[in-house]
Image (tube, helix red, strand yellow):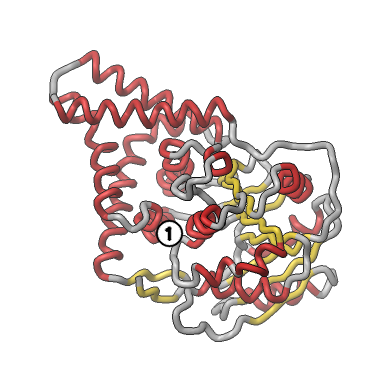
Amino acid sequence: MILVYLIFFFLILRFTVTLFNFISNPKLTRSALQHDDLISVLVPARNEAFNILTLLQSVKVQNYRNFEVIILDDHSEDKTLEICRKFAESDNRFKVLEGEALEPGWLGKNFACFQLARAASGRYFLFLDADEIVADDLFSNAIHRMKVNKLQLLSLFTNQIMLTTGERLVVPLMHYLVLNLLPLRLVRLSKNPAFSAASGQFMMFESQNYREHQWHAMVKDRIVEDIEIMKLVKGFRFRGEALLANGLIFCRMYRNLSEALAGFSKNLLAGFNNSVLSMSAYVILIISGPFVIAYALNFQLLIFAIGLIILSRIMISLASAQNPWLNVLLHPLQMVMLLVIAVLSLQKYFTKTVTWKGRTIKT
């Protein structure tokens, strides 16, 4: 019964966090005010020939005009460099760089972002991944948020595009983990760096602050650099905020189950601050909970627990613009995928190697 009570306490705590996030609605708000500050859109790209043209076209046609786009080709083994150069020929706001050789002690993306910032001249630095689509009003609303809340860093959790069953089994776990564990409003409202969240898919910095602190250089060897940067920003007593994208930017992170498993297992343990105990306890409690309650033969408690889980999935799905009934239906299989991801993450941690984009990362 002690274990049952522990599971229920954890379940109610997570439901409370989810309810807080749903009611507080932590989304990038839309404003009628227009801004025209120069934005440097910075895109690290390695083997992105399949994705990057869609991003570049979406940036070019959106309604914010005062921007520069700098793409850094990070030694791609496909036609990324060729595609980007050809696109840049049609618009002088787009510039393509070839990345320098990876220096010892750096991870590839972090070094690419560091190089991009050196070449940028905007009032704001906006780091985007190559597999995204930008919607109208994103830039102006993001700048407005930066100014209104006097932020040095704004990060957005993008709306996710999922086309295959494998993606639907894994990708929703990103929003599920964030909105089920962290009151997102506290990223800005609390000065405690423990309340930190961020997504490398959208990281907007006030450029002077970035130049002074070189945030990517400070996390040059960190796999989950986005969260680590947010912790540092708050640790230096600057203001950071993480929000849901509210339909202003979209991303298709992965294209099949194997890609999704590889990507999530690269980041999961790091998201728990590389604490094997914390991640293991979380996964065990969240997956075993209903089975332990059912074993205790308390039907009323089991129905209550299932109800909280279903309500949580509905609220998180609605907040993140996903199909709530599909996520409820797939929840058991998604939990199986979470267990698989955790096992893969532990395997990579203990063997101290992660392979990503053709590079082997020593962790």
Q: Which residue is mark 1?
A: 263
Above or below residue 311? Residue 353 is below
Residue 153 image position (x, y, % from top left): 63, 54
Mark 1 residue type: Gly
Left or right: residue 74 versus residue 64 is left
Q: Specify few, some or many for label 1: CA neighbours under 10 Å numbering under 14, 14-19, or 20 or more.
A: many
Residue 233 image position (x, y, % from top left): 56, 56
Left or right: residue 109 versus residue 71 is left
Residue 198 image position (x, y, % from top left): 53, 51
Above or below residue 247? Residue 193 is below
Question: Which quadrant of the view contains residue 334?
Answer: top left
Above or below residue 77? Residue 268 is above
Left or right: residue 175 versus residue 288 is right
- The structure residue drawn at horizontal position 58% and vertical position 45%, both measured from the top left corner, is 242
Left or right: residue 67 versus residue 270 is right
Residue at the outermost front position: 237
* Camera sees residue 253: no
Give the structural element (helix, strand or loop) at label 1. Answer: helix
Question: Which quadrant of the view contains residue 37?
Answer: bottom right
- The structure residue drawn at horizontal position 24% and vertical position 66%, both measured from the top left corner, is 350
- The structure residue drawn at horizontal position 69% and vertical position 73%, both measured from the top left corner, is 83
Residue at the outermost top position: 300
* Camera sees residue 347: yes
- The structure residue drawn at horizontal position 57% and vertical position 53%, both measured from the top left corner, is 237
Residue placed most toward the observer, 72 or 17: 17
